[in-house]
Amino acid sequence: MTPDRAVAIVGIYATRQERASGRTLLSLTMEAIHGALDDAGLTLADVDGYIAHQFPAGNGTGPTDANIAYQLGGNIGFFADSTGARGVLYAAGAIRQGLANVVILPAAGSSAHGTELAGFARPRYEFTEWTGSMTAAQFALQARRHMHEYGTTREQLAQIAAIIHGNGVKNPAALCFAGAEMTVQDVLAARMIADPFTRPMCSLVNDGASCIVVASAERARDTRHAPVWVIGGSGQTRGNTYFEAPSLHMRAARSGMLAAFERAGVRHDDIDIVMCYDHFAYGPLYQFEVLGFCHFGEGGAYATEVMGLDGKHPVCPDGGNLAYSHFGLPDNFKQIEIVRQFRNDVADLCPDAASGAHTYDRRVCRKVRDPKLAVGCGAMTDGRHSITLLAKD
Amino acid sequence: MSFPAPIPSPLSRPFWEAARRGELALQRCRDCGRFRWTPQYLCRHCHSQHYDWVATSGRGAVYSYTVVHRAPLPDFQAPYALAVVELEEGPLMLTNILDCPFEELRIGMRVEVALRPLDAEITLYPFRPSRSEQRPATPDSRRAHPLQPHDPRAPAPD
């Protein structure tokens, strides 16, 4: 076992992503856990670590680590409140420390709140909410500043949205599946939410769940699929974007990202897939900057040039937050899509996709050609910046 | 769902009391002299725990802006202008811009605070273009009053 082959993603699963599912968080979570363990060829009895955001319900039920542990028979040796890239890094740390061997990372979101959710009030951010600000506006403020400082254009934002959307329409699991491809003009002409963001430049809102299984190299040997190695990553926090005045302060995360690449011995040029966190079309362009792929200010031109399916660094071949799914915690999908692309388990419109035969005709195919190295971004929204670096043998 | 009125904390209370008195106050670090916003216990630069609340000029310039077309709550009437203002004293502050046609919003525009009582405890701190920037109103001017209908002093939208 080499240091960078100590921890692997061994199982993945996504439930049906849809609007108004009517499903409870608990049922979605349990389906996702079972699905990911089946995918790995493992069972509930193998699980000794649990990482997920906690949603305690007012009546004591709900997907919390304690409730899930109870259902599993009480065998959780490590738990943490996290998801996506940062969750995978926590799992990796725990596994390396010998605190766990098989960690499950479920995530779920549902509009069917009912009595199952806790009665706690949404936190009222003292210096934000009175202004009528909300997520789209917070990031619109960042995007506008980026446009002012660097000359980034609306057309670049629209092109990013159109490219990712184009991936989603080829993904049978996506909310936007079989929709029409969007042009830059279509995106610019769509309904304005918070200037400069039009609706297609913003994340979807829907229900669904996912789960990742992370295991030690030793346990990975017994699992069904080739392991996807967690060879490195970075987890930073700089401040609460939803609470502090939005600015371009996350530029300061770049040094930590460069250090992560260096620790893992990875060069940017060698990266195949970059699963940017596309909360808005603005995300990929500044993330390429912060991740160190290009200089600050170049992100608009750089992203639009490299992010296509046949580009140097394909972004969100699944359709991302913009066109595949956003049930509240889409972070896991940024890991899951890398695993699917590595495994050649990519559902699209190629006639023989199910058997792994892809045409690479971009009218129907969203398979990336032979990816081996990828960046899986966590949510880069509220001042926190996390990535995993994933590799296949 | 009611208007998301700010809820002061022991840390922030002096800000709201100053606003009620008609002042835009910021904490100023007693050791390195930097002003800061939002209220914090420590200076982020020198980590000093010593500070004073200081009344500021209330003036700044627009660092960024957006026009919100889809309000998050029924209490807000879109469209309205949101901005980050860079205060003369240094910090960035999230706020609204009132009394400015949307097409005239621009980064670098000089603005001044226009304190507006919400209730007995809270006075809000939207901004408006500085006197030198103001244009005469026209019937076609778009005016952003996101506080409708909770701000009885705001003129009715066009």
Image (spheres, helix red, strand yellow):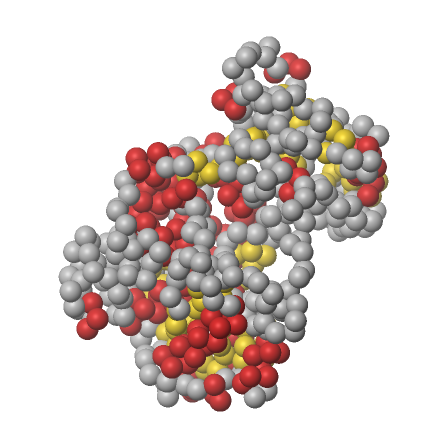
Q: Residue A137: where, in percent of width, then height?
A: 53, 40
Q: Is residue B96 left or right of residue B34?
A: left
Q: Residue A96: where, in percent of width, then height?
A: 52, 80
The answer to whether residue A386 is above or below residue B125 is below
Q: Could you say which quadrant of the image residue A362 lies in?
A: bottom left
Q: Residue placed at 61% from the left, 32% from the top?
A: B146
Pick the residue in front: A109 or A138: A109
The answer to whether residue B4 is above or below residue B62 is below
Quadrant of the frame with the C terminus of chain B: top right
Is residue A386 among what the camera can see? no
Pick the residue in front: B7 or B52: B7
Q: Could you say which quadrant of the image residue B78 lies in?
A: top right
Number of numbered discs visible in the structure rendering: 0
Q: Residue placed at 31% from the left, 75% from the top?
A: A393
Q: Residue A5: where, in percent of width, then height?
A: 41, 78
Q: Residue placed at 16% from the left, 56% from the top?
A: A361
The answer to whether residue A367 is above or below residue B81 is below
Q: Is residue A315 left or right of residue A135?
A: left
Q: Is residue A347 left or right of residue B6?
A: left
Q: Could you say which quadrant of the image residue A345 lies in?
A: bottom left
Q: Residue placed at 55% from the left, 11% from the top?
A: B138
Q: Residue A71: where, in percent of width, then height?
A: 55, 84
Is residue A325 among what the camera can see? yes
